[in-house]
Image: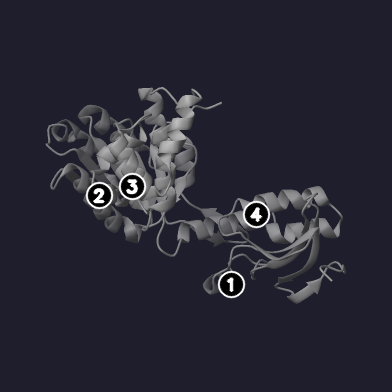
């Protein structure tokens, strides 16, 4: 059984109840760096623990005492602590952040030891905005003027490499590189290699903002275009990587729209499977649909045996009506799920063919 780590328990509450670590730090009257140190602790002073408990409305005194008496408190391990505190930065998957929650990930990057560069992908039109935002967050931690912003063109990479020895002597604590190249041909390989070289030589934080205009093209069949995913797959062991989406969630929208239709829409797949009495196939499609952040599942009614769910897929934007050919209308379905067995049965669904189509005639909830 995993030992109780009070710093990690506090971090879980902070993530659930505060918009950012910085917001919690302000309420605690501590710096962001001092607050991150709390998350790595296996024990805290009573005065601090009392204040944290009040702010988070959770009795950490009682929890900690009980765990101590039962011998279940973790012993502090610096390497393990660093790994566990680093919970916001993406290493296992390509995480997506919006303008409303990206502050936390950049705060954490600047506060953690410099191990590897952070590469962030965003739309071309947002690259300057995000570059300025990252620089501002860094200066909030290191001080005014302590973050160096660099604009690097794909044709100036040789000059950028030549300047690395000079940049190591600069007084700044971090570099934010806004790269204007694309992901074609060798992708972002060269700028990532140079960012690694800069970090190793300077021992400073390095953030690279790369342009990624994800979209779907339909030249006979739908094709998803994005450079973020292949770059992440190639470099994920050597960089932190994330996507900085816009307020309209364009990246998530196009990625998940394509995923939902790649092998036939998940919602329609459930209907087809149930029509063919393929319960296992319906369960698999439902599991795939649940992986999409745009998937909606609402319980409409419930009795002692069945729950009636309304499930729906990604909502197609009006301007994309003809983008995916036959898939030109959002789909909603109403299904019954047996509470005890998980068995699925379909009531009706709504799609491009017209409004409510009865697939199965069953009595439900009287």
Q: Which residue is mark 4?
A: 289
Helix, strand or loop status at disc 4: helix
The answer to whether any part of residue 27 appears in the image is yes
Q: Which mark is residue 137?
A: 2
Image quarter of residue 346: bottom right
Mark with earlier residue (1, 4): 4
- Near mark 2 (Cα within 10 A), the count class, few <14, some 14-19 or many ≥20, is some
Residue situated in front as seen by the camera: 346 or 67? 67
- Nearer the viewer's eye, disc 2 or disc 1? 2
Quadrant (top left/top right/bottom left/bottom right) for the N terminus? top right
Q: Which residue is mark 1?
A: 321
- Nearer the viewer's eye, disc 1 or disc 4? 4
Q: Which residue is mark 3?
A: 21
Q: How is the image coloured?
A: one colour
Label 1, label 3: how far apart the Cα atoms are: 41 Å
- Nearer the viewer's eye, disc 2 or disc 3? 3
Mark with earlier residue (2, 3): 3
- Nearer the viewer's eye, disc 3 or disc 4? 3
Mark with earlier residue (2, 4): 2
Image quarter of residue 78: top left
- Near mark 4 (Cα within 10 A), the count class, few <14, some 14-19 or many ≥20, is many
* Percent position of residue 226, x then y: 48, 51
Label 2, label 3: how far apart the Cα atoms are: 12 Å
Q: Are marks 1 and 4 in contact (CB under 8 Å)?
A: no
């Amino acid at each position: 059984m995993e030992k109780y780590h009070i710093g990690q328990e506090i971090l879980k509450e902070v993530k659930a109840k505060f918009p950012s670590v910085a917001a919690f730090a302000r309420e605690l009257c501590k710096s962001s760096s001092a607050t991150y140190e709390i998350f790595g602790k296996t024990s805290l002073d009573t005065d601090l623990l009392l204040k944290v408990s009040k702010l988070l409305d959770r009795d950490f005194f009682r929890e900690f005492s009980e765990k101590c008496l039962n011998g279940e408190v973790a012993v502090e391990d610096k390497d393990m602590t660093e790994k566990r505190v680093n919970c916001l930065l993406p290493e296992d998957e390509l995480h997506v952040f919006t303008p409303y929650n990206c502050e936390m990930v950049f705060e954490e990057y600047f506060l953690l030891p410099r191990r590897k560069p952070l590469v962030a992908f965003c739309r071309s039109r947002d690259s300057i905005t995000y570059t300025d935002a990252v620089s501002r967050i860094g200066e909030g931690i290191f001080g005014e003027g302590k973050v160096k912003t660099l604009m690097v063109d794909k044709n100036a990479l040789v000059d950028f490499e030549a300047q690395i020895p000079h940049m190591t002597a600069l007084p700044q604590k971090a570099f934010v590189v806004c790269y204007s190249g694309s992901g074609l041909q060798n992708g972002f390989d060269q700028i990532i290699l140079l960012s690694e070289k800069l970090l190793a030589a300077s021992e400073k934080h390095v953030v690279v903002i790369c342009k990624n205009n994800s979209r779907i093209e339909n030249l006979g069949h739908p094709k998803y275009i994005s450079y973020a995913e292949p770059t992440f797959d190639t470099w994920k062991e050597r960089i932190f990587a994330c996507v900085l989406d816009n307020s309209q969630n364009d990246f998530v929208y196009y990625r998940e729209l394509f995923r939902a239709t790649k092998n036939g829409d998940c919602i329609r797949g459930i209907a087809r499977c149930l029509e063919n009495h393929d319960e296992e196939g319906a369960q698999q499609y439902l599991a795939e649909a649940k992986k999409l952040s745009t998937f909606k599942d609402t319980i409409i009614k419930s009795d002692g045996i069945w729950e009636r769910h309304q499930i729906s897929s990604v909502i197609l934007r009006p301007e994309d009506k003809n983008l995916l050919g036959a898939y030109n209308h959002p789909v909603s379905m109403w299904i019954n799920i047996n509470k005890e067995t998980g068995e699925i049965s379909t009531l009706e669904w709504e799609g491009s063919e017209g409004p409510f189509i009865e697939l199965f005639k069953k009595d439900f909830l009287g």
